[in-house]
Amino acid sequence: MLQVNGERLWASLMEMAQVGATARGGVRRLALTDEDRRSRDLFSHWCRDAGMSVSVDQVGNVFARRAGLDAEQAPVLIGSHLDTQPEGGRFDGVYGVLAGLELVRALNDAGVTTRKPIDIVSWTNEEGARFTPAMLGSAVFTGATPLAEALAKSDVQGITLADALDSSGYRGMRAATGNTVDAYFEVHIEQGPVLENNGTTIGVVTGGQAIRWLDVTLTGVAAHAGTTPMRYRKDAFFACAQIAAELEQIVEQYAPRGLITIGQVDIPNSSRNTIAGQIAFTVDLRHPDDAQLDAMERDLRGACARVAQARGVNLQVSTYWSSPATPFDPVCVALVAQAVEALGYSHERIVSGAGHDAIHLARHCPSAMVFIPCVDGLSHNEAEDALPDDVTRGANVLLGAVLARAGLIGRSSPGE
Amino acid sequence: MLQVNGERLWASLMEMAQVGATARGGVRRLALTDEDRRSRDLFSHWCRDAGMSVSVDQVGNVFARRAGLDAEQAPVLIGSHLDTQPEGGRFDGVYGVLAGLELVRALNDAGVTTRKPIDIVSWTNEEGARFTPAMLGSAVFTGATPLAEALAKSDVQGITLADALDSSGYRGMRAATGNTVDAYFEVHIEQGPVLENNGTTIGVVTGGQAIRWLDVTLTGVAAHAGTTPMRYRKDAFFACAQIAAELEQIVEQYAPRGLITIGQVDIPNSSRNTIAGQIAFTVDLRHPDDAQLDAMERDLRGACARVAQARGVNLQVSTYWSSPATPFDPVCVALVAQAVEALGYSHERIVSGAGHDAIHLARHCPSAMVFIPCVDGLSHNEAEDALPDDVTRGANVLLGAVLARAGLIGRSSPGE
C-alpha cells in the first residue's frame, strides 16, 4: 500500500516552524505579515520543486496543482492554512498543507498518476487573529463572503486586507470564486482532548457542530455594600451566579455533546464595596445537532427569565452569532473511514468542535476531515505538540482517501 | 424645649449646595479643590458671623468654637465633612457640619450658654475620592494615621496632600493631634434604605460594623470552548458561580445583619470562546459582631475550598483589609436615645454600615451618631435627597444630646 514518508513530512514541518519561530518553541505568523509571506514563499518553492504549478487567487489563497490524466476533471482539493495565532504552535493548519505536499511527493516517488488533478491550497487568514472574521480566504472561495467585503476588512492598525495582499505580493490574478472542486479533504490536529483521552489515533470527522453566541445583560441596582441589607438588594452578580449554576445543570441533560461556556463577564463601574448594579456576560452554546442546540437555548432563556423575575432584575438576551451544524459529505467521510480501516489504525467518529476552512468548503463541495491527537489537547498555544507517528498516520489516511477519490491510474516508478 | 430653626438650616444647606453644584442637581467638591476651599470659606464666614472663633489644624481640619462657661473644660465636638464624591449629593457630610452650625445659631437665638465649649469641625478628605484612604483628617486627629504619612499622600495627578493644603490656604497651625475631646456627635443621612423602609425618623447609631475585604483567585485551565467536552473542563468561572451561589445561602444563616458583596470579577485574557482559565473576585463581608464576622469568613473559606477541590481548580484566598466592629460610647448613645424620646420622634437602634469620621473618633473619645432617612436609600449619587422635616428632626436630636453633654447653663434670650 502506498504510504507517505513520515520523516520527510516531519522535517518539512520543523523547517516551516522556523519561519516566525518564537523563543518558547511556538510560531507567530499572522496573516500576510512578513513571516506569513516567507511561509508562502517556502511552500510555493517546495511545490514547484515537486513539479506542481502554483497560482494565487484574488484573496491570496495559494494553489499548487499536480496534473491528473484527465485535464477536464475538477480537482480533488487538499488544504488548510499557514497563518497562526499570535502565540501559535507548529501544527495548527500547517500540518494540513504540508501533509498535502508530502502526499504529492509520495506520488512522485512512486511514479504514479491520478485521473483527476490534485490541488493543494493554503487559505488566507484562517485564524482571524489579524483580520476578522476567521476563515476569510475559504469564505470568499465558497461565496460565503463577497470578495470586495473581504478586501475592505482592516486589522487593528487600519491596514486593509487589500493593502496587506499588495504589500505581501500575494494578491493574485486567479478568480477567487466560481471554482469547481470535486472534493475537499483537510487533515488537522484535533485541538481538543478526546482522541488522546480515548487512546484513538484517527478521528473520522463527520461534520462541524452548531454554534450559537448569546449576550446576556442583567440590570439590578448598584448600592452601598455596607448600608444595604441583603433583603433589599437587587445584586446583578448573584443573579448571574445563580443562572450560571443552573445552566451548568441544564447542560448535563445534553451530555456529552452539548457544550456551554461563559467566557467573558463584565460589571460596569465595578468597585469592591458596591453591589453590582449590572453585569454583562457571553454564552457560547454548541451541539452537533441543530434541534438540540435550539432546545439548549430555550432552556437557557427560560432559566435566565425565571431567575431574573424571582430577583426583580431586568434581563436582556440577544443572539450575537449563530452557525448551523454542518454535516460533511457521507461519501467523503466513508472514503476517510475506508482508508483508516485499510491502514488498521484505531479510529472513532468525531464532530469538529472548532471552526475550520472545511466547514465553508462543505457548503460548496463534498468535503471531509481527518483529525489526529494533539498532546494534552492543547492548541492556540506555543506548547502545542503532536507525536511524529500520529502525524505520519494522519497523512497516510489523507493519502488513502484522496487517491480513492482522485482515481489512481498507473504505477510506473523509474526505480521499479 | 429648645429646637433648631429648620428653615434656616435647609436654606444654609441649599446655599452650600451651590458651591460645586452639578448640572444634574448634585455636588462635586473634591477635597482641597477650589470648590472645597470655597465651601470652607463660606462655612468659616458663617461661623464667625455666629460669634465663633475659627482655627485650622495641620491637616486642614477646620474648627469653630462657641465658648462655654468653663474654659478649662474639653469641648463637646460636633462634625462631619464638606468634601463630596465626584458625583455626590447635597447632604452627605455637609448636613452634619451645618446641623452643628444651626445648633449654635439656635443657642445664640435663645441667648443660652453651656458649661463646656462646643466645637464644630469639618474634617479633611472624608470621602477618599481625591486622596486615599478615606477619613484622613479624622484619622490624623485621633492618631490612627501619622501626620507626616497623611501629608505625603498624593492624588492621581501626583499632587500631595501637603501641596493641596498649601494651595488651598487651609494648612493650619493648630496641632492636629493630642487634642482632648469631651465627646463627639455626628448626624448623617443613613446612606441606606432601612429607616425609610421601616418608616422610622431617627436612627440611634450604636456603632460601626466589622468589615473584611478578601481577594479570591481560582485557577483552572483555559481551553477551547468548542473542542473541550464538559467533563474534561476545569472552568474557573463555573467554579466561581457555584461558590457565589453557596455564599449567598451561607449568609442567610447570618441574616439580617450579615452582608456579603462580590463587587469585582476579572477573567484575565477573557474571550467569548475560551473557557475561563482563571478568575479573580473580591469579597466584602460585614457584620456588627466580630465573632460572627469571623464565623462568616470561616464558612466562606470552607465553601471555597470544598468547591475548588471538587472541581480540581486551584484556590487562593487572601485578606486585603480588615476593620473590627466599633461600638459607640453607651453614655453618648443613651444621650441620643433620650433626646429623641423627649422629642417624640419614631426611632430605632441601627448599626452604621458605611465608614464615618465618628468611627475614628470612637477610638479617641466617647462618641455617637444620629441617622436620618435618605430618599430611596441613595447616596454617593447626584440624586441623593432627604426630606426637610427629617433634616430638622435630626438636628433637633443632635441639639438635645449635645446640650445634655455640654450642660445647659442659662436661658436669658434678649427676646424673652
Image (cartoon, coloured by chain):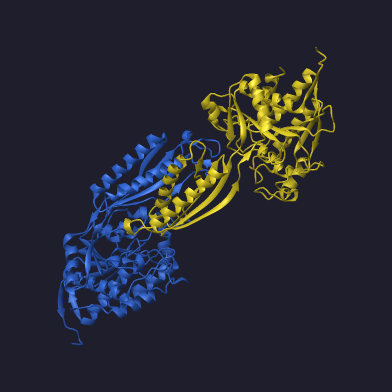
Chain colours: A yellow, B blue
Q: Up-down: is B150 above or below B398?
A: above
Nearer the observer, A293 or A112: A293
Q: Up-down: is A119 above or below A141?
A: above
Q: Is residue A66 visible?
A: yes
User: Which of the 4 image quarters holds residue B46?
Assistant: bottom left
Q: Up-down: is A28 above or below B352?
A: above
User: Which of the 4 image quarters holds residue B197?
Assistant: bottom left
Q: Is residue A186 visible?
A: no
- Residue shown at 16%/74% (left/top)? B408
Residue A238 picture location, percent across and down: 39, 51
Residue B338 picture location, percent across and down: 16, 69
- Residue shown at 20%/86% (left/top)? B414
Does residue A28 appear left or right of residue B15 in this picture?
right
Does residue A350 appear left or right of residue B295 in this picture?
right
Residue B325 picture location, percent across and down: 25, 52
Farthest top residue in view:
A416
Q: Quadrant of the N terminus of chain A?
A: top right
Does residue A203 appear left or right of residue B289 in this picture?
right
Q: Quadrant of the C terminus of chain A?
A: top right
Residue B373 picture location, percent across and down: 30, 68
Does residue A366 appear left or right of residue B332 in this picture?
right
Nearer the observer, A375 or A14: A375
Nearer the observer, A296 or B288: A296
